[in-house]
Amino acid sequence: MPPSIPTEVRVRAACPHDCPDTCAMEVTVADGRAVKVRGAADMPFTNGALCTKVAHYLERVYSGRRLLHPMKRVGRKGEGRFERISWDEALDTIAAKYRDIAAEDPRAILPYSYCGTMGLVQGESLDRRFFHRLGASLLERTICATAGAHGWRATVGAMLGADPEAATEARLILIWGANPVVSNLHGWRHLQEAKRRGARLVCIDPRRTDTAKKCDLHLAPLPGTDGALALAMMQVLIAEGLLDREYIARHTLGFDELAARVRTCTPEWAAPLTGLAAAAIRSLAIEYGRSARSLIRLNYGLNRCAGGGMAVRNVACLPALTGAWRHAGCGALLSTSGNFPVDGRALARPDLYPDAERFPPRTLNMSFIGDVLLDTRDPPVRAIHVYNANPVAVAPDSHRVRAGFAREDLFCVVHEQFQTDTADYADILLPATSQLEHRDVHKAYGHFYVVDNRPAIAPLGEARSNTAVFRALAQRLGFAAAALYESDDAIAAAAFRADDPRVAGLAEGLRTQGWARLALPAGYAPFADGGFRTPSGKCEFFSAALAREGLDPLPAWHPPAESVPSNPALAARYPLALITPPARNFLNSTFANQARFLAEEGGPKLEIHPEDAAARGIADGARLRIRNDRGDFVAHAVVTTDVRPGVVCSPSVWWPKLCEGGHNANAVIAARPTDMGGGPTFYDCLVEVEPA
Ligand SMILES: Nc1nc2c(c(=O)[nH]1)N[C@H]1C(S)=C(S)[C@@H](COP(=O)(O)OP(=O)(O)OC[C@H]3O[C@@H](n4cnc5c(=O)[nH]c(N)nc54)[C@H](O)[C@@H]3O)O[C@H]1N2
Ligand SMILES: Nc1nc2c(c(=O)[nH]1)N[C@H]1C(S)=C(S)[C@@H](COP(=O)(O)OP(=O)(O)OC[C@H]3O[C@@H](n4cnc5c(=O)[nH]c(N)nc54)[C@H](O)[C@@H]3O)O[C@H]1N2
Ligand SMILES: [Mo]
């Protein structure tokens, strides 16, 4: 036989990860094996480049540690000892359990997923349909963004904001609770371009991040105090008359009430709360008030505190006062996700829920999964099905989370690419495909493009996609609804509402180039002429909707739950405020088991100011124990002025089992909900630190 000629093909793909940038990728496949992954050169936002994590995606796909077969537990719960079984045995076991539990009360079954993949097909289609049809408990997916989203929506009505590609037009950019160099690299390119064109960049972050170092000015408020800073800025804008009065009159609601509310919120009032000098606050407000061509690039860093919802709301009020929304690339941007006309009902089919009268739907909050599994409730959760998520590593108050997963009477299915800390608690552990092995389509939250993902290679080993698993389970449970068996292609094709003008040309773009921009004009400015999506159609300084929820209808100061002024008794024992933002080489806990990235990060670290270090006899590099009443974890000291006295920072999210002592930072973080949206408070945490 003649030697076979290697055939090389290029397949269009999408980066699946939870990141604002949702890159378009091109995968080169030779003889059925992916040999190269790169950023699509023709996709404007990706611009031919991937971050270091995904540039090495093939190391993940072909890692020797991939899960490749179904397994069942043979050791104790959490021990992580498994034995290989067939897919038939795995699926039969799960189906039998779910059938038995559902016969009594299907709400005792809980799906648990987040954004392991952001794909609409593998992330929120057949899984939702299956659990709706089963009548399982519903999951409130709060672990990241719901506090800020709630505050944002109350103010401007929808997750719409400035066009990130037009940010180059802004003259003043406030980067607020965001670290784009690390967590929004492709968006950062446009901010840098704005700077080259003469814009001034101001970073508002308790930590001097890589982003802060590249800005013209860095203000380091104490964690969880952004709400006070924004109120003081409003006070100055109003007192100094730095206002777009015409915009306010035409497009806002409740200005007089707002003015009355902030009258006493002077920079002198905010200074002790935020730890910033009153003069610095005043000069920031005046600079902001004088340049209408301003952009506030928020991200979710400021929403992970007790007052996170209100903080985002207060910041969202600012551009309506100065009229910044009038200009392309100006105003504010938290997320672009509201621009995508995703057909959520068609994807998730909530109408499949079988018997709402007998079993009124029950919703459980993912952020407090420890409480969900441990507290008495009717019915108790008897089975949990985890996919696209790693709760034992990422959810707050890990000791409670672990105790919940360790329950002998809890039947636990985990569908994963790797044996995570959560996987260790599985009764049945299923192998999941990677993004190169399945079909998907992606919207984005940091730009306006839809990105297609075609399978480039066959599933490795016996790995199956999420949709394949839910089809197989539906069949074993004898469910008849055709919607439970739809193909990935059909789901992808119907993911967006076809009658929406923004998807004009979408199908054609995806077919020919693998990505397509929403049909929005270049330099699109959503609120240039008002058109807010609130009930009043205006930017609501006064929100009747919030009042109906029992919340303050006006911007207000919601202090952190754990800080020196708000909880002095606790601060006497635990005086340091801990934040745990993303490490550059990890994506939440994804990638945090891969040798290259572990080596790059060099072990769990705690950044601490020289004064705080000296007071505790801590030298640079020392092994530290970080603790409070909830637990402790170990990290090595980085003595640095990048954090201010009183604040410590431990970049995250490490796999607990790869940490000395078996715990990561979530061991010390409280399971306490935010003021709005039921989110977690990862960056609202007091600790003490000592040499270990
Ligand atoms: N490399 C990398 N990229 C990522 C991720 C990752 O893990 N790694 N995660 C992805 C995900 S899921 C998300 S949600 C986004 C997260 O990215 P961002 O939304 O940018 O949010 P965070 O990284 O949580 O926080 C951003 C900055 O807020 C700062 N911060 C902490 N507390 C406060 C505060 O109280 N006030 C203010 N003003 N700032 C504060 C932190 O120091 C951090 O530098 O990034 C995504 N991109
Ligand atoms: N201390 C602290 N904790 C945090 C944060 C923080 O900043 N500090 N950030 C929080 C934030 S913003 C978020 S969004 C959450 C994120 O929490 P999660 O969404 O749970 O994110 P990951 O930890 O990345 O875990 C995702 C898992 O999904 C798996 N996966 C990927 N693709 C697939 C697939 O196709 N099928 C299946 N079945 N599995 C797949 C991956 O292997 C990975 O283990 O973490 C939160 N936790
Ligand atoms: Mo997130």
Image (cartoon, rainbow, N blue to C red):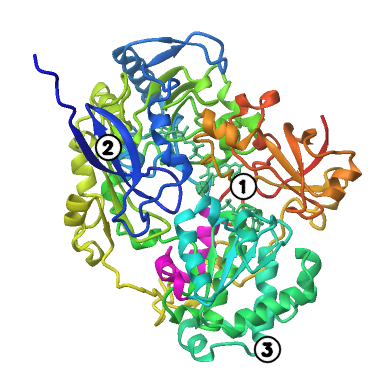
In the image, residue 80 lies at what x, y percent?
53, 16
Quadrant in which residue 429 is drawn:
top left
Side (left or right) of 270 relative to 439: right
Mark 3: give few (<14), some (14-19) or many (20+) Cα within 10 Å: few
Tag 1 or tag 3, which sits nearer the N-term?
A: 3
Contact, mark 1 vs mark 2 (Cβ under 8 Å): no
Residue 677 visible somewhere in the drawing: no
Side (left or right) of 334 relative to 371: left
Q: Which mark is residue 28?
A: 2
Q: Secondary structure at mark 1?
A: loop
Pointer 3 residue: 240
Pointer 1 residue: 581
The amino acid type of the residue labelled 1 equals: Pro
Distance (Cα) linking label 3 and label 1: 36 Å
The amino acid type of the residue labelled 2 equals: Thr
Distance (Cα) linking label 1 and label 2: 34 Å
Residue 427 visible somewhere in the drawing: yes
Q: Which residue is more in the foreground, 376 or 290? A: 290
The main secondary structure of the magenta stretch is helix
In the image, residue 430 lies at what x, y percent?
39, 21
Rendered residue at 26%/48% (across/down): 346
Tag 3 or tag 2, which sits nearer the N-term?
A: 2
Figure check: 20 above or below 321: above
**Number of on-image labels:** 3
Q: Secondary structure at mark 2?
A: strand
Ligand 1 within 8 angstroms of badge 1 C-beta: yes
Q: Secondary structure at mark 3?
A: loop
Q: Which mark is residue 345?
A: none
Specify the segment rendered in magenta. 146-169
Distance (Cα) linking label 2 and label 3: 59 Å
